[in-house]
Image (tube, rainbow, N blue to C red):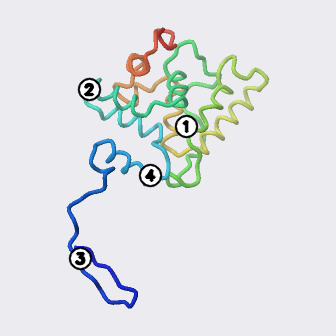
Amino acid sequence: MIIRRNPDGSVIEEQATQQSHPALTTRRGMAAMAESGRAVPPLFSEIATKINNAKDKPKKLKVLQEHDSVPLRQVLKGAFDPNIEWLLPDGDVPYTANDAPVGTEHTLLQQEAKRLYLFTKGGENTLTNNKRETLFIQMLEGLSAEEAEFLVTVVNKKVNNKYKGFTANLVKDAFGWDDNFMKKD
């Protein structure tokens, strides 16, 4: 039943038709409509949680492939590639978690990924260790608490410890990478 008001204020009741919106007739259309109301793209920590919760490898691969992006690949390469050496101390990082609600007063790891070179060997050699650590703490404090925690696991190369089944082999399979984390020919 649809209820409408005339310009004079009187009420009109109409029977709703059974036709649906054309975009809602497919699964892809439904998924697009579900994501359209979202203010921010999925956080990398949310993607990692989806992978953790997926029951088997094909489902985990599907999650990674659905959310494939250059920033995600950069972050995951830093998490799993043994040739990438982080110039930050191992372990917990002394930062204050940003408790602002998601989608409000924080940055996204998707946008900050381009600055991660500052914290790797060969990335930015002019920074002192103290300045590098300060910049990293500022980055963590700008991210949502969940994404900051995810980034710390990436830097410590312990993603699989927190998110079960999130392994180097899974990432290589999802993105078609070889053992050097480069695209296969």
The disc label shown at residue 56, or none: 2
Residue 15 vs residue 84: left or right? left
Residue 18 rendering spot, x and y as whole percentages:
20, 61
Front disc: 3 or 1 = 3
> Which of 179 and 159 lies nearest the eye of the viewer?
179
Q: CA distance from mark 4 to mark 1?
A: 16 Å
Mark 4 or mark 2, earlier in chain:
4
- Alpha-carbon neighbours of circle 1 within 10 Å: few (<14), some, or many (≥20)? some
Mark 2 or mark 1, earlier in chain:
2
Q: CA distance from mark 3 to mark 1?
A: 46 Å
SS at circle 2: loop
Disc 1 marks which residue? 110
Q: CA distance from mark 3 to mark 4?
A: 31 Å
Front disc: 4 or 1 = 4
Q: CA distance from mark 2 to mark 1?
A: 26 Å
Disc 3 marks which residue? 14
Residue 30 rendering spot, x and y as whole percentages:
31, 48
Mark 3 or mark 1, earlier in chain:
3
Disc 4 marks which residue? 38
Q: CA distance from mark 2 to mark 3?
A: 48 Å
- For residue 52, what is the image quadrant? top left
- Alpha-carbon neighbours of circle 2 within 10 Å: few (<14), some, or many (≥20)? few
Identify the amino acid type marked 4: Arg
Mark 4 or mark 1, earlier in chain:
4
Mark 3 or mark 4, earlier in chain:
3
Residue at horizontal 74%, vertical 32%?
131
Question: Total number of numbered labels?
Answer: 4
Mark 2 or mark 3, earlier in chain:
3
Residue 143 rendering spot, x and y as whole percentages:
57, 43
- Asked if residue 102 is positioned above or below residue 152 in the image, the reply reads below
Front disc: 4 or 2 = 4
